[in-house]
């Protein structure tokens, strides 16, 4: 069993896609073990994207993630990390296959609807950041 973090970004919340995205995760057989709707502070988002600190898009992505409410989901299941990444599709929605969340609902790389942990180390770090009290 693996755990992973999914963030539904401000655009996904604004476009009423919380249910659609969460339903796809649940239908796949993965379990929601933590869930919260929050307006994230800059400090948490900067820590979340720490690996991208030197990239040119860092400021933009941090501003975007703090621009409105987001949903943080802790997901558990067999091979959850890879399964979720495949379901979300390529980071740039233009490269995402139809049938994936981004391939079905997104067009822009900044507003690519979700973030999901890339590997087990990232998942542990990110879950600790967004669910510090370990609600699952
Ligand atoms: P995410 O998986 O949340 O991780 C970093 C985010 O930065 C990424 O999704 C995109 O939404 C955003 N981003 C903006 N520009 C780029 C870029 N050129 N390359 C990668 N990610 C980018």
Image (tube, rainbow, N blue to C red):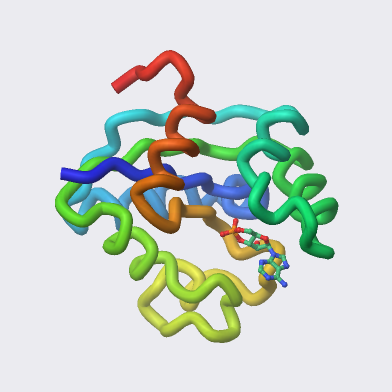
Left-right relation of 135 to 89: left
Indicate the quadrant containing the C terminus: top left, top right, bottom left or bottom right.
Answer: top left
Q: Nearer the viewer, residue 4 or 11?
A: 4
Ligand 1: which quarter?
bottom right
**Number of numbered discs on residues:** 0
Q: Does 66 sit above or below residue 135?
A: below
| Residue at x 78%, y 41% (from the top left corner) | 67
Q: Does 122 sit above or below residue 103?
A: above
| Residue at x 20%, y 56% (from the top left corner) | 79
Picture coordinates of residue 37 (x, y %)? 54, 30
Left-right relation of 23 to 131: left
Picture coordinates of residue 119 (x, y %)? 38, 55
Picture coordinates of residue 126 (x, y %)? 49, 38
Quick one: which residue is furthest to the top in this view? 133
Indicate the quadrant containing the N terminus: top left, top right, bottom left or bottom right.
Answer: top left
Left-right relation of 133 to 78: right
Find residue 54 and report its image quarter. Answer: bottom right
| Residue at x 57%, y 77% (from the top left corner) | 93
Left-right relation of 103 to 108: left
Q: Does 106 sit above or below residue 80?
A: below
Picture coordinates of residue 109 (x, y %)? 67, 70
Q: Does 92 sit above or below residue 19?
A: below
């Amino acid at each position: 069993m693996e755990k992973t973090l999914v963030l539904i970004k401000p655009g996904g919340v604004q476009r009423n896609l919380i249910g659609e995205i969460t339903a796809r995760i649940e239908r796949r057989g993965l379990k929601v073990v933590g869930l919260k709707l929050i307006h994230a502070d800059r400090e948490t988002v900067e820590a979340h994207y720490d690996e991208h600190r030197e990239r040119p898009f860092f400021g933009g992505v941090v501003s975007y993630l703090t621009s409105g409410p987001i949903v943080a989901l802790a997901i558990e299941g067999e091979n959850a990390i890879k399964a979720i990444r495949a379901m979300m599709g390529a980071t740039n929605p233009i490269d995402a296959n139809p049938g994936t969340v981004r391939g079905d609902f997104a067009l822009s790389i900044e507003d690519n609807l979700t973030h999901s942990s890339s590997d087990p180390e990232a998942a542990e770090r990110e879950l600790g950041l967004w669910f510090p009290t370990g609600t699952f």
